[in-house]
Image: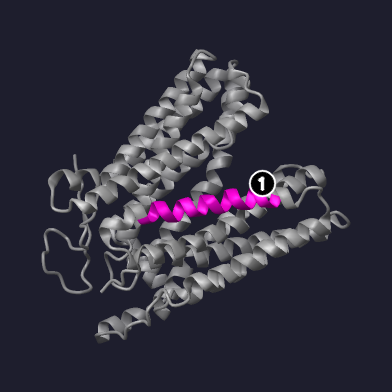
Amino acid sequence: MTQDIGWTGVARLGLVQACMGAVVVLCTSTLNRVMVVELGLAAVLPGLMVALHYLVQISRPRMGHGSDTGGRRTPWIIGGMVVLALGGMTATLGTVWAQTDRAAGLSLAVLGFVLIGTGVSACGTNVLVTLAKSVPDQRRGPAATLVWIMMIAGFALTAGLAGHWLDPYSPERLLQVAASICGLTVLITIAAVLGIEREPAAPTSRTAANDAKVGFRQALDQVWREPAARRFTIFVFVSMLAFSAQDLILEPFAGSVFGYTPGSSTKLSGVQHGGVLLGMLMVAGAGLLAARNAGKAWAARIGSLRAWTVGGCVASALAMAALALAGLVGPGWPLKANVFLLGVANGAFSIGAIGSMMRMAGQGQGGREGVRMGLWGAAQALAFGIGGLLGTVASDIAHWLMTSDGSAYSSVFALEGLMFLVSAALAWKIRVSPAGHSSRDPAPAPRAAALQVAHET
């Protein structure tokens, strides 16, 4: 049976997400700026390190399998945060060392980013599995919203405080700030997760016991053979590729086509993030309303995570199509409103997808929750690692082929909109029984596949 940890437990896991966000933003934002500005390095170097930390996250399924086998998630969450904090300090030390010895310092920083990716894989994967196993179905959308908002808050709070404490900048001050952030995140994580997880139950059958002993490769192969898990993996990759591909080109687009100053284009990103937050809150509100009116047909419709996922992807495609038109029309286009609506659509589909991910983690072959969540997390990380590069490369190619900046950006935005439509089609074909049972098998065996995939024409 699922242990309901309540909203307090969800908030505690949200604190862990906030701590992960705090260390990651220190390394991907603050260290990135120090390397480029204070050290005078080419921007591609920290960019490659950030991409490396995403690449390392292909280890997520292995981390999930480790906790599946042991039956407990808490040690992996705490251990992952410790590794993440060590990675943050190692990357900071490498950055400071690079001021006197470039080769040695950058080598150490690379090691730090490898540790960061490893720590995020272990900690982040098992936080989501714990949520999936501990939050009732009707509250998963709101729970996902709360956890992600807390992670965003961790980004914002750390960026603000680190910026305040680092001024005036010095290498010693950077080390002090990094040590404070990394040390606090470990302590907060330990306090947040202690006692949140029950002791693992002993296997109730010989088959269940044998499942726990299956090797990683076999477990991953079993999950990949599940049609819905495989389809959802592809959906996560394509949708997050489209989501991330516009990150590095939206501000240059606003500057070159609409004449935005650097400060104005930065504010435009803030408008988009505000839209993302509103989209997340819309899904959470719909989920809570549906839970309070359980049993009513209209409540089931507005609380459907699948509907929010598909609808959010379609709305994102329409917003990207509007941006493509904006590139052709130019300064007369309501760019801020367009970007805000894109953020709303992105936020809605993201929370719908995360809620669906939490629901699907326990459906299919028994004892594979960690592997499934890890597989989807790895797909997301790879998409984010590739997305920024893909967007900029596509933009460069379009500028080479076309003489107009607006037309070049329009072609890239149109391509991203097409990817969102493909994502919507993939999400539409995935049907998940809320109770974890296939509708064609009302009384399945305890470990029978509980996922129905509907191929609709």
On screen, residue 90 versus residue 200, left or right, reads: right
Q: Which residue is mark 1?
A: 47
The secondary structure making up most of the magenta span is helix
Residue 14 visible to the viewer:
yes
User: Which of the two residues, 180 or 1, is positioned nearer the viewer here?
Assistant: 180
Residue at 60% x, 65% y is 185
What residue is shown at x 48% (from left), y 64% (from top)? 60
Residue 53 vertical position relative to residue 445 in the rendered view, above or below: above
In the drawing, does residue 245 fall left or right of residue 68? Answer: right
Q: Quadrant of residue 269?
A: top right
The residue at 56%/68% (across/down) is: 188
Q: Magenta region: which residues?
A: 143-162
Quadrant of the drawing holding the N terminus: bottom left
Query: What quarter of the picture does the C terminus occupy?
Result: top left
Residue 18 image position (x, y, % from top left): 53, 58
Identify the secondary structure beneath mark 1.
helix
